[in-house]
Amino acid sequence: MPEGHTLFALARDLDTAFAGTSPTVTSPQGKFAHGASLISGTEVEGATSWGKHLFVDFVGDRVLWVHLGLIGTFTIDTSSYAGELPVVGQVRCRFATEDHVADLRGPMVCDVVTPEKVDEVLGRLGPDPLRLTDVRSDPDLAWTRIHRSRKPIAELLMDQAVLAGVGNVYRSEVLFRLRVNPFRPGTAIKRSTWQAIWDDLVALLPLGVATSKIVTIHDQVDEVARALEEGGDVRLDSRDSYVYKRAGEPCLVCGSRIRTEVVAGRNLFWCGNCQRRS
DNA sequence: GTTTAATGGGTAT
DNA sequence: TACCCCTTAAACT
């Protein structure tokens, strides 16, 4: 269930759990047996993410490269019996120390690679709104591709070479929040509109990291942002969206029926009445 | 019990 | 554009 916020939080949590340790790495399911043997017992230097890609750095220039795809999960268990945690289901890769067990299931990519390969992967990815401090995360890099492309903006937002980390929920929701017509070609999008989309993602994704939910409804965004500023507990029970998965229901703003159509291979949701901006 | 959808993306046609 | 892969839970029969 991964968009960029999920991977960012996962990298942070893996880093906390395993950096400086030398976990036993196995492949209970067997499909990663060789890769696991290459890194098992080696010290973890740290874990980072870019967009939907996760990298776990090991001493000795070996990197575990993971992409969860549509259905992958990577869960960390910190129970006191973690070292004896039974294997449930198809576990491609397990990290285990005395204190923690992390199980990877259903990834699209799980490979041991070199730092050079990581650079190659990063080179194919656009700016990540969660990595603002990195020089590679310049929104102008995305703009260069967007304003030259005749593809609809709803498709461009999903293109990881344009923008890294946005998936099917954030694209529908951010386009609604900014009232942008999802079918406008990149060539028709105003620069100020792109800047507004980027700025909104920069604001929204950290809320996703903090809550493990995609928060886009304005009231909830305000509530979570305030809680974060105050450093308090960030809790959010409901999981609402303006348009995502609400086909046929009334728009929360104008009451029109929310529409849906497959764009870039996934179900796009939008309000035809509210979203007219270019 | 079987089918489908799911916050993804690569490769072939 | 179509097909394929990966896993799981919910929606079907």
Image (spheres, coloured by chain):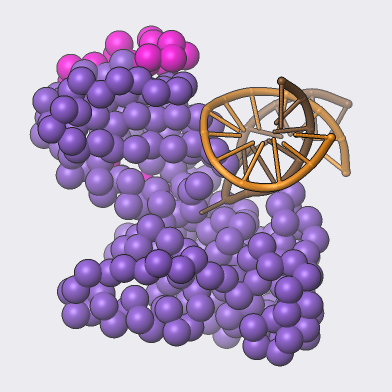
Chain colours: A purple, B brown, C orange
- Residue A126 in the image: above or below residue A89: below
- Residue A172 in the image: above or below residue A222: above
Residue A257 location in percent, x, y?
Answer: 78, 77
What residue range appears in magenta?
A: A27-50
In the displayed structure, does residue A232 sit left or right of residue A123?
Answer: left
What residue lies at 39% left-to-right and 48% top-to-bottom?
A7
The one nearer the camera, A220 or A63, is A220
**Residue A34 position by quadrant:** top left
Q: Is residue A144 visible?
A: no
What residue lies at 13% left-to-right and 32% top-to-bottom?
A80
Point out the image quarter for the C terminus of chain A: bottom right
Residue A184 location in percent, x, y?
Answer: 76, 74
Query: For residue A44: magenta?
Result: yes
In the displayed structure, does residue A174 sit left or right of residue A137?
Answer: right
**Residue A146 position by quadrant:** bottom right
**Residue C6 position by quadrant:** top right
